[in-house]
Structure formats: C-alpha cells, structure tokens
Image (spheres, helix red, strand yellow):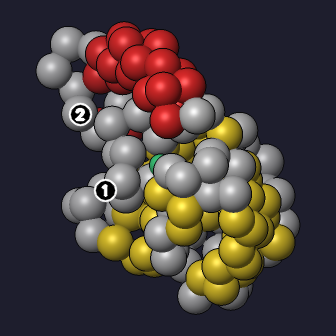
Amino acid sequence: MRNRVWFASALFLPVAVAASLVVLGAGGSFAADQPAASCAPNGPALAITASDNKYDKTCLAAPANQALTIDFDNQDYGIPHNVSIYDKDHKALFTGEITDGPKKIKYSVPAIPAGKYEFRCDPHPEFMFGTFDVG
Ligand SMILES: [Cu+2]
C-alpha cells in the first residue's frame, strides 16, 4: 500500500510541476498580476471542490458587502487544502481552515467590498488559485 501511494505521487508530481510552470509563465507569480477573469455571481452561498490538487473552478463571484459561505469539498486523501481570499496587495481578507482530505467544511466569510480579488489554497498557491469577483 505504501509503495502504491508513493508510485501515484511519483506519477503526479512531474505533472503538477509542469502545470505550475505553464501557469507561472515568464516570471509571473501571482494571478492578480494578470488580467482578472470575471464570472457571474454564484450568490452568497458558494461551493468549490479540490481534487487531484486542482480546484473545480477558476472563478468565484459573490455580491458585495454581504456575508457569504463557501462549501469546500477537499477530496484529496491525506492532502491539505483550503480556500483563502487575498486582495491585490496580497493581504488576506479571509483565511480558510486547512483540511486534510477527504473532508467537507463550510467557511463563513465576512462581507467584502466590491472588487477583484484572488482565492487560493495556502499550501499550494503556485497552482491552486482563481479570481474572486465581488460586485
Ligand atoms: Cu491545496
């Protein structure tokens, strides 16, 4: 069993490294430095899943100045993930509790003013992130 887990990790790691290199491109290191994506508001009740070290969404949107919730489903066995929200100055507006999968958690996020933000996984900021669009 231990060997199988190691083998799966050995297969996965080069893929993750290659993917993060593609995402980072020529010197970029933070998604907010790039043109921000937009998406329609998902309402004050958001949901996102992590599996295979990837989020299932690249954009989350919520109404401004309204407390919201994020149902986070970490499906990765034994891998820590979370969802945190940062502004352009890399200041954390919300830091979600880090969970080892498989686990579901509901985050309660305080109201956020309108604007473009970034959500990301604190253990994997290089390849798990997206736009957090509030407005
Ligand atoms: Cu992660």
Image height of 36 relative to 4, above or below: below
Q: Who comes first in sequence, dot 2 or dot 1? A: 2
Query: On residue 29, which mark appears?
Result: 2
Disc 1 packing (10 Å; few <14; some 14–19; many ≥20): some
Query: On residue 56, which mark appears?
Result: none
Image height of 56 relative to 135, above or below: above
Q: Does the numbered disc 1 mark a residue whose Cβ is under 8 Å from ligand 1? A: no
x, y percent for residue 49: 72, 50
Residue type at numbered disc 2 = Ser
x, y percent for residue 96: 50, 74
Residue at image position (48%, 26%) is: 3
In the rendered view, does 60 fall on the left or right side of 95?
right
Asked whether the viewer can see residue 40, the reply is yes
Image height of 14 relative to 85, above or below: above
Pair 2/1: label in front = 2
* Label 1 element class: loop
Residue at image position (37%, 13%) is: 14
Asked if labels 1 and 2 touch by Cβ distance under 8 angstroms, the answer is no
x, y percent for residue 90: 26, 60
In the rendered view, does 55 fall on the left or right side of 80?
right
Which image quadrant for residue 26? Answer: top left
Is the C terminus in the top left, top right, bottom left or bottom right quadrant? bottom right
Residue type at numbered disc 1 = Lys
x, y percent for residue 116: 49, 55
Disc 2 packing (10 Å; few <14; some 14–19; many ≥20): some
Q: What's the CA distance linking mark 2 and mark 1? A: 13 Å
Query: Which residue is under mark 1?
Result: 88
Is the N terminus in the top left, top right, bottom left or bottom right quadrant? top right
Residue at image position (62%, 49%) is: 77
